[in-house]
Image (spheres, coloured by chain):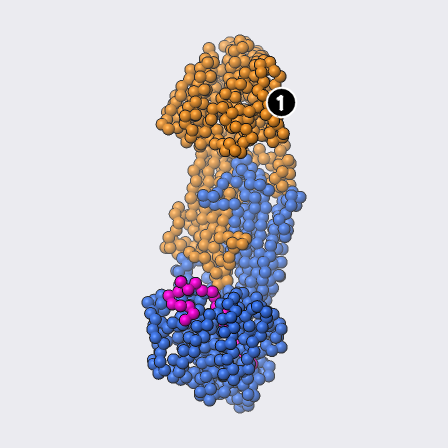
Chain colours: A orange, B blue
Amino acid sequence: MTVRTLLIGLLLASAAADAAADDAVAAARAYREAHGAKVLADFARFLAIPNVASDLPNIERNAAYIRDALIARGARMELWRQDGVPPLVYGELDAPGVELTVGVYMHYDGQPVVPAQWTHDPWSATLASSAIESGGTAIPFPAPGDAIDPEWRIYGRGSGDDKAPLAAILGALDALDAAGLRRTVNLKFFFEGEEEAGSAHLERYMTVHRDRLDVDLWLICDGPVHQSRRPQLVFGVRGYTGLEITIYGARRYLHSGHYGNWAPNPALLLASLLASMKDTAGKVTIDRFFDDTVMPGPAERAALDALPAVEDALRLELEIAPGATEGRGASLAERLLLPSLNIRGMVSAAVGDGARNVIPTEAVASLDIRLVKGNDPDRMLEAVEDHVRAEGFHVVRETPDAETRRTHPRIAKIVRGSGYPAARTPLDAPAAAIAVDAARRVAGDALILMPSLGGSLPLYLFNDLLGSPVVIVPIANHDDNQHAPDENLRLANLWYGIDLMAALFTSGPSRPDPPPGD
Amino acid sequence: MTVRTLLIGLLLASAAADAAADDAVAAARAYREAHGAKVLADFARFLAIPNVASDLPNIERNAAYIRDALIARGARMELWRQDGVPPLVYGELDAPGVELTVGVYMHYDGQPVVPAQWTHDPWSATLASSAIESGGTAIPFPAPGDAIDPEWRIYGRGSGDDKAPLAAILGALDALDAAGLRRTVNLKFFFEGEEEAGSAHLERYMTVHRDRLDVDLWLICDGPVHQSRRPQLVFGVRGYTGLEITIYGARRYLHSGHYGNWAPNPALLLASLLASMKDTAGKVTIDRFFDDTVMPGPAERAALDALPAVEDALRLELEIAPGATEGRGASLAERLLLPSLNIRGMVSAAVGDGARNVIPTEAVASLDIRLVKGNDPDRMLEAVEDHVRAEGFHVVRETPDAETRRTHPRIAKIVRGSGYPAARTPLDAPAAAIAVDAARRVAGDALILMPSLGGSLPLYLFNDLLGSPVVIVPIANHDDNQHAPDENLRLANLWYGIDLMAALFTSGPSRPDPPPGD
């Protein structure tokens, strides 16, 4: 079944699907209310296994834990391997008579820890009455039947980033099983063990096993919900590239009195070059910079309009005056749908106490470029380089020799950084409806649809290499201290995760034969 | 006699004066050829007295040496004092019946030394067969009557910078005395003992003794001759001021993905601001920047046209391409007659390995401004600040608080540096003729008249506080290693100094009653 015909079925079956999903969400809630203590105890066992990617023995224990937990729920599991790196935990869990397949990505490794910076042992899950920063204190884990406050938090490395999705998946599968509800999607699990170490082998795992990884939609289970605490689905990430530009003056520092007004000043040349790239309203003025950009469609525009406004609060916190932002009044989320050119650093000689009366020998700017759907890293770098040439610079790759410097009045050394493209699924893409439908059943009107994150992740691999759309499905609270000491997961977010997974697993056409015209 | 009536007399008497000066130069040459060994021996004794300004006991020995040497030549000498600092060696040597008075400035202190970096003891004069860098070796000092090679060099701290003028003055006075020639100018000696330590007390010495320091012309005996080895007179120096500009973004570093394209980037704002101050041809575009500039007159223009061209050699050495220099083809000397705006440093966040994907919180530029005749440091800084305001920035003096940052979209903190004005004597100023006349008699057509140095010295004190014009009279070779190890004076330059002083002391109207109309 193609996604498009599937979607037609989904729409036709919406009333029945609604009912099934609502059943599933109700079943998830009932299950976690009855068995919350067990869910937490299981999760605590998982969190107690150290999960730094370089700690291969413990990484193996994590992988085995996941494999065994999913085998126990009926999945066929495999550990894919490359020498000396964490295994990729792969699994399949079919639903009888179902053609729709959803891939679930998460990563089971976590950031390294400095235990002394943690309030409690990062490798021994601790339950707290609320956020420790806000006065929460350690409490005992509940016994079966005890009431559980959703504001409690479970502490431990990986609790929010990114072991929570497994707890949600296991809870959802158990809830559906307990209620006798069948899944309407086949599942493929694709769990990475070195995301925090840079995902260096992810592409190879995908390439080698590409034929096993054909799904209708990838759910990327990572990251936090919206800072307003409202659940969100995120439909893309920005890509990334960058470059460093060095402009040259005389070959040695010159006395600014003896040579000032005559010898070229590379800091001035660089300032002029940078100023020519972007106007002070924040619009990039480089030819072709926006040519390939896929602009937001009506569905994205509607989602942008529905977003909670965060700009006033951000300006207050960041101490930015009204009118100072780039894009002049455009929302942050809207600006993230355009490619950006950012001066991340600029240095020529020295300032402050280190400043001397010299004409600098060179001036360097480090630029990063965030890409959106449609932008190719190399094409973007070409556009920037062509702009530098159009400004009169002779572009070189290596530090110029004396002959080059004596020949070309303006020289720019450009060193290109690596990069990768953006990934973005249209909000009205047929497959996206699987996720939107499920999340809305759980969250109702509180659900936020975010067209793109501002940050960059290599999700293009799922789009381009595996050929399927992606939707990011965050579960963790926004204040989960990810990558930091005292990482935690708020229980309300874990409960949301279980409900959401139950809804996702029962999304799509619930019956093989939807009544025509219904 | 005023300088103006004096000059008329000088012009009327030129033929007679020529003859007198030529006599004096001939007498100087004859004297040093006969008594070169004595001149060198005396100079070696002077060089052997350590002269770092902070070494007060030895500084006193230097001052006493100078005082005694000039008393022996008939001068009235005084050591002016301020507590704990080197004395100012003051003296008067009148010429009977003469109204014209020339002040002679030199400094008898030298830069500190690191003896291990010297080939020979810096405090024990060494004679060498040529420059040590070019293979010169130590040779014995000559005995009376021995032939002396003018390419020999005498090594020791202060040999070039700035004890040489005293040796020249003493040699010239002895030569005139030996030949029975009378001076045509009164002399006032004004010898400083802490120039290399920053001249912190010079202004006070001048203020306290202003009524003793009324002269028709100050000869500033310091610095090297032209790098072509040709003798030069220099008619001015540039003044100096500067400022540091800090532009602000958000109060903390922001993730360039999450906020890039929305949060303001201070590096971009700074780049735009700097680019608005000066075009890429090197012309400052700030309103009023050139308003007060005294442009070169016909005499300066003629001198500029007569200068040896150094630009091609400089471009080769400094690896600057044709067309890269600011001012597009204007000579270096010509550019030094305009006020300059130089970016001496520019920093925002980091580049290279230190670069991170952030939007910087601030961007800083350190600027120095070289002033020419007519420019006032404060007025120049006002012009720059008004430009910054015209570019839309709210200018503050202190780091802005949260309220200020939330109110003003663009904020520039400007911290002004100290400064002082330029000094420049018109080449056709009546008093300048005293020096030009004398130097030309010694050097002939080889004499270079340099309207201004590019560097800055507080000679405005002589102009503005003492109210007299200045001409800089360099003696030392350009490759004298001043401020560095192995400082030296080439004997040809010492001989030139003796000849020049003899000519200067016999410059001006040589007779009370020049024949009318001659």
Dot 1 falls on which chain? Answer: A
Q: Nearer the viewer, residue A405 or A503?
A: A503
Q: Is residue A330 magenta?
A: no
Residue drawn at (49%, 45%) of the image: B350
Q: Residues within 10 Å of mark 1 (few under 14, many from 20)?
A: few
Residue A311 in sight in this render: yes
Q: Quadrant of residue B119?
A: bottom left
Q: Nearer the viewer, residue A401 or B420?
A: B420
Residue drawn at (39%, 82%) of the image: B35
Q: Quadrant of residue B175?
A: bottom left
Q: Is residue B510 above or below residue A434?
A: below
Q: Is residue B181 above or below residue A357?
A: below
Q: Is residue B411 above or below residue B24?
A: above
Q: Nearer the viewer, residue A367 or B204?
A: B204
Q: Position of residue A27 (x, y in %)?
A: 57, 13
Q: Position of residue A404 (x, y in %)?
A: 38, 53
Amino acid at dot 1: Asp
Residue A18 in sight in this render: no
Question: Is residue A200 left or right of B4 when viewed as pictured?
Answer: left
Residue drawn at (54%, 75%) of the image: B89
Q: Position of residue A351 (x, y in %)?
A: 53, 52
Image quarter (top left, top right, bottom left or bottom right) of the N terminus of chain B: bottom right
Q: Position of residue A488 (x, y in %)?
A: 55, 27
Residue drawn at (53%, 89%) of the image: B511
Q: Residue furthest front?
A: B57
Which residue lies under the disc numbered 1?
A: A445
Q: Is residue B108 magenta?
A: yes
Q: Is residue A128 above or below residue B325?
A: above
Q: Which residues are magenta?
A: B101-124
